[in-house]
Image (cartoon, rainbow, N blue to C red):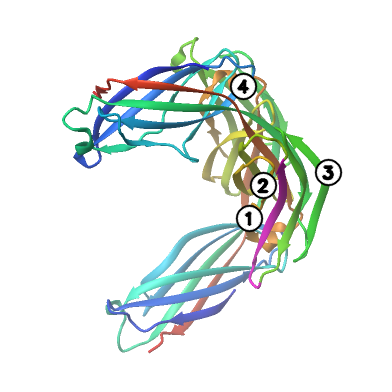
Amino acid sequence: MVIKQFESEAPDDDGDISIDIAFEVKNESEKDVSLVKWDLLLLQNGSPLDGSMRNSEECLLDKGDVYDGSAWLRINQRLIDPSAQDVTVKVFAKMYEREFFKLGEIVLPEEANIPVTVAANIDSSLLESDVKVSLIRIPDDNDENAKEHSIDLKTVITNKSDEYAEEVELKVVLFDRSGAEVDDSRDMVEVLGPHSGTMFQPSFWSQPKSKLKGSRVELSLKVYRLVGTQVLVESKRLSD
Amino acid sequence: MQLVKDRFDWSSGWRGDFEVEYGIDVVATNDTDYVIELVKTSSLILSADGVAVGGAGGYWYEENVYMDPGESSTFSVATSNIFRSLLGDDVENVSAHVDVTFFTKQFAVLGEFQVPQTDGGASVVSSTTEIGGIQIVGASIIREPSDDADRTITAIVGVKNPSSETIQKTEIKMVLLDRDGQQIDQSESDETIPRNASIVFQPSISEKAGRLRGATVKLTATVYTAVASDSLVVSDPCKRD
């Protein structure tokens, strides 16, 4: 990982100093990287001045490919030691590979309150292979004459591995009878610990009952696994 | 299609006593043979003197609904806040002239394209599709060169309306999928097409070049055609609770 740009401006009328920082991080793993998370910190004499934290971006990096990151920071000059113009830039980057699975589709049942289930078998290094998703349409306010129905889905996802699974997401896309996309719904957890599980419950609220005739949902699941971390520490000098 | 008043009420607008905000809901029963999926509404609000002092309408006042033949639906009518001094002393002595147009929807998948893998590259589908009375004369995808890591993928979709009717709303949607089939992003563009006229839609998506490896683009068209309309005059609004 290298810093490609570090530019600071003289303080403005409020005493604020703008700093542009750009860096690049190379995929040094053997895996395709589909997600990069990074934090960039600026310190002086070991004390934090500012930073750009909890950044996350989807990408696709083959081995050797480079991710470009950048941050714009604004620091008031009174926070900076006037006797020293040197600051330290720290960048923590985490790279993830993605597993993505199409779980299939469910044609909506014609009647309310009748659950239907689709079973999928996924080839995952992190998650249990058997995934069952159930779907039920429920009349609004539990009124059998309701003109609108909600669609509730449920599935249990289990991390069978000794590693953390991150950004685990079940996505459901609702299509009408003509094949046009109507809406989508997602449920996700940021972290699923080793040998743990959770339930996803995406839903669609108050869909016109008649519109649901012949509708279907398509299901997909994605999960990220950490494949590498990189840390950069570099000293830079602010402009006078 | 017959409109029936469901609500006509008023309350003070966001500027307090200076303004009045009117709310109108109407009910319609679909007596056509079409499925209605969009309504466009407009209104003129007339003072006791018969002068239009407000109202609303235009291109963006539309609402997605769903009415099979024989079904009813309730929806709101576009209105605006009225300056109270235009109404004299009696904010309830007004009437609103409501116009509603009902649209049916037709949908078609135009195709799925490989995203060009090199800058300046293009993909073309030459087939012509007819949908909702308009012609979609092929489609193409171009990948624009760039000096940075982002690349812009643009679809070019030529649409001709050879009919003698204005097509109120045609929407072209582009969905970008990565090599595993996960949706990366989507872009939509919609236009009104006058009779005997053509329009070129150009929805576009910018994405990191690396993420476009093996990516595909799915293009769809949705055409909304007017099938019915009706008007209604409502009066005597009541104060909102």
Quadrant placement of the C terminus of chain B: top left
Residue located at (21% from left, 36% from top): B84
Residue located at (42% from left, 74% from top): A42
Specify the subunit that label 2 lies on.
Answer: B
Q: Are marks 4 and 3 in contact (CB under 8 Å)?
A: no
In the image, residue A230 sits, relative to residue B175, either above or below, namely below
- Extreme residue toward the right, this view: B126
Q: Are marks 1 and 2 in contact (CB under 8 Å)?
A: yes
Viewer-proximal residue among A194 and B93? B93
Element marked by disc 1: strand
Label 2: which residue? B174
In the image, residue B134 sits, relative to residue A54, either above or below, namely above
Specify whether disc 1 shares its chain with disc 2. yes
Q: Position of residue B223 (x, y in %)?
A: 65, 35
Label 3: which residue? B127
Q: Position of residue B51 (x, y in %)?
A: 30, 33
Residue B35 image label: 4
Amino acid type, label 4:
Val
In the image, residue A145 sits, relative to residue A123, either above or below, namely above
Specify the subunit that label 3 lies on.
Answer: B
Amino acid type, label 2:
Met
As for residue A95 lying within the magenta part, the answer is no
**Is residue A159 in sight in this rendering?**
no
> Which marked residue is nearer to the observer: mark 1 or mark 3?
3
> Which marked residue is nearer to the observer: mark 1 or mark 4?
4
Magenta range? B147-161
Mark 3 surroundings within 10 Å by alpha-carbon count, few (fewer than 14), some (14 through 19), many (20 or more): few
> Which marked residue is nearer to the observer: mark 4 or mark 2?
4
Residue B205 image label: 1
Residue A182 image label: none
As for residue B151 lying within the magenta part, the answer is yes
Work out whether mark 1 precedes mark 3 in sequence or the reverse, and give the earlier one.
3
